[in-house]
Amino acid sequence: MRSVRHLILLAMLPVVALPAADESEALLKSVVKNVRAGNQDALAALKDLHDHKLAADAVLSIIGDKRVGLGIKLRLAEIVANWPPGGTRTQLAGWLAKHPNCDDDELQFFASLGLLEARAFFWGILTQVKGPLAEVRDPTRIALAAKALGAFPDNPETVVTRVAALLDPANAHVLRSCAAEALGGMQHVKALEALLPHLGDDAIGKTAQGSLYRLTGQDFAEEADKWKTWLAAQGPSIPWKRFTALDYENYLKTRKLLKPLDDDPAANMATFYGMEFRAKGALFILDVSGSMTADDRIGRLKAQMTNILTAMQNKPASVRYGIITFGESVDSCFPARGIEKNDERNLRQATRFIERIQASGGTPMCEALNHALSRVLPAGNLDAIYFLSDGVPSDGTPAQVLDLARRIHEKYKTRIHTISIGEQPAQNADMPSLLNQIANACGGTFTLPP
């Protein structure tokens, strides 16, 4: 055992700097530790550690940790996607090849990286499908494979047509949505032609329009004839663009600022708090907590839902919908499956459900989203969720609510639109509210009714 005098002498020795390699290793360990504690900002250090021999191990330990939130894993994917080719990225591709049955979180991560070395791996997932795509039991993995292949603009026609086949309306929404998104990265005329028939599709139309913009820089919205005229004018020399999904979002924001004031979706009767209802499979998740009694918020909610149910009579019978309320408890309009087809019997049941709503209890957002995630979405084939609340979660943190919403969107490609009741307009655009963050992260629209 060391004496006190010996310890004092050691403390008096000059501090010797660690070798650079040891410092990097210590930093990697620190990053992993902090990320596991929920600190997403710690990931920033990884931008400069891509060439460290242990970088791949650090990344894999984070991705494989069930305690790490999906938001952190998605941010990590953004960082690794920008690492230079070779080196650590090649190591990661090697790990994937040895673990073809990795879980969905891990596959989601790899599908976002644009790994050239993993291109054949993802193509293999698509070609292994036997029988009708509409009968596939686990469409998520096939959808992620299509998403991964969308990173390569030089895909041959065989790949493009295989991905285009996923657009068939008979297929699960997650397949159709990921395929529409992936085609936006494939510079092939077959990709353009495959997207045109789906421009007005209530489930994937906006995604198809976005992909056409990303490929061409043109925007003819749902007007397929204008797209065909433009394509004919280009001949064999299409001036390809390589715009990203973020480029398209920024374009839409600019277009919205220039939109005529009389271009108001509220003129359409099928609206929910002024938001146009367009979906083939939709779930309304509604806050009926005690605070909804203020300013007769619950009365307005009932009126808005009654308006939607009335408009449903003019929608096709193939449209499906469900209603979940959360307050004193989480309740479903259609307890058996959570979502039902648009017919008279279900309309009467939904109308009675809305009439009986009473505002009481807390705001169990996590319980409501978990109910949707575990009991409705697996077989629901939903493309839209309308999430309304006037408060903050009473059964978890905002970060947990956001992570659940992200998980729904990433696994099922369901857009989550949010309506915030009683919220004051944000004074700082860099600090959006929870419901605003959910809409931004989940491909939806945020609405702040007056």
Image: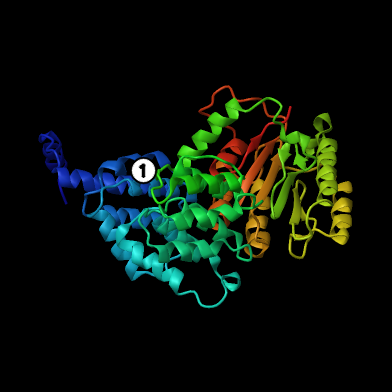
Snapshot quadrant of residue 321: bottom right
Look at mark 1 in the image and give the residue it sits on: 43
Q: Is residue 258 visible?
A: yes
Choose between 403 and 351: the one closer to the eye: 351
Choose between 257 and 450: the one closer to the eye: 257
Q: Residue at x 40, y 67 (%)?
A: 123
Q: Is residue 403 visible?
A: no
Judge left or right: residue 209 versus residue 216: right
Question: Relative to residue 21, is residue 188 depicted above or below?
Answer: below
Q: Amino acid at mark 1?
A: Leu
Callout count = 1
Choose between 211 and 2: the one closer to the eye: 211
Identify the coloring: rainbow
Judge left or right: residue 64 versus residue 138: left
Residue 9: percent from left, percent from top: 11, 37
Q: Residue at x 84, y 52 (%)?
A: 313
Question: Relative to residue 13, is residue 61 depicted above or below?
Answer: below
Question: Relative to residue 252, is residue 257 depicted above or below?
Answer: above
Residue 265: percent from left, percent from top: 72, 35
Q: Residue at x 42, y 54 (%)?
A: 186
